[in-house]
Amino acid sequence: MQRMMYQTDSKNDAEEESRTPGSTVKGKKILQIGGLGTFTEYTVVQQINLAKIHPDAPLDKVCLIGCGICTGYGSAVNTAKVEEGSTCAVFGLGAVGLAAVMGCKAAGAKRIIAVDTNPEKFEKAKIFGATDFVNPKDHSKPIHEVLVEMTNGGVDFSLECVGNASVMVGS
């Protein structure tokens, strides 16, 4: 399978959006939203959004660099600005969540509570820096109440890495 990514030289999202609706490759329409081509074989993106990788690089590995790692780590370090000595809760231990745990650790958090419904993920989270582990299925009360009790008042930073609105409200 040949993999191609097409780009524009546009510096303006509105200009890019006006170009892409009619774009095609091999007679098939190229679809995107917000300048992204997630889960697509072909897309049109701005040059700034493009990174060239070695043709022999394993796509199942490098795909993590494209979003999950940067999003999770960046959410802890750049967006939340986790502080040294703080207590953090990370909800979801997929690629984004594990990277958020790593970002919390790099920022100096003293306690990082990993929250996930799959306890098999806890060992990997420990390697990335998680100090405590909570499976919401093991508790009859809402998870935020569990965290308040565990921490004597609540966490300093809560990072929702599941992409589920109800989890976000509970975090």
Image (spheres, rainbow, N blue to C red):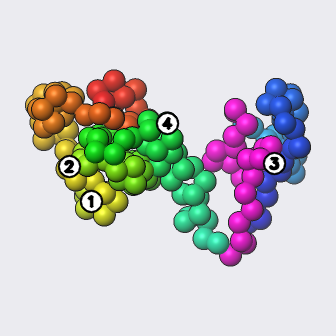
Mark 2 → mark 4, Cα distance in angstroms: 23 Å
The residue carrying pointer 3 sits among few (fewer than 14), some (14 to 19) or many (20 or more) residues within 10 Å by Cα, namely few
Q: Image check: 60 left or right of 31? A: left
Q: Which residue is mark 3?
A: 47
The stretch of residues the image draws in magenta is: 33-56
Q: Amino acid at mark 4?
A: Thr
State whether residue 28 appears in this view: no
In-front residue for pair 79/118:
79
Residue at the location (43% across, 43% down)?
76
Q: Earlier in the sequence, mark 2 or mark 3?
A: 3
Is 77 situated above or below 98?
A: above
Q: Are dots 2 and 4 in contact, CB under 8 Å? A: no
Classified by dominant secondary structure, the portion drawn in magenta counts as loop
Q: Of the numbered discs in the image, which one, if any, rests on residue 126?
A: 1
Q: Is residue 27 magenta-colored?
A: no
Which sits earlier in the primary sequence, circle 3 or circle 1?
3
Q: CA distance from mark 1 to mark 2?
A: 9 Å
> Is 45 part of what is drawn in magenta?
yes
Q: Amino acid at mark 3?
A: Gln
Q: Label 1: how many residues lie within 10 Å, few (<14), some (14-19) or many (20+)? A: some
Disc 2 from disc 3: Cα separation? 41 Å
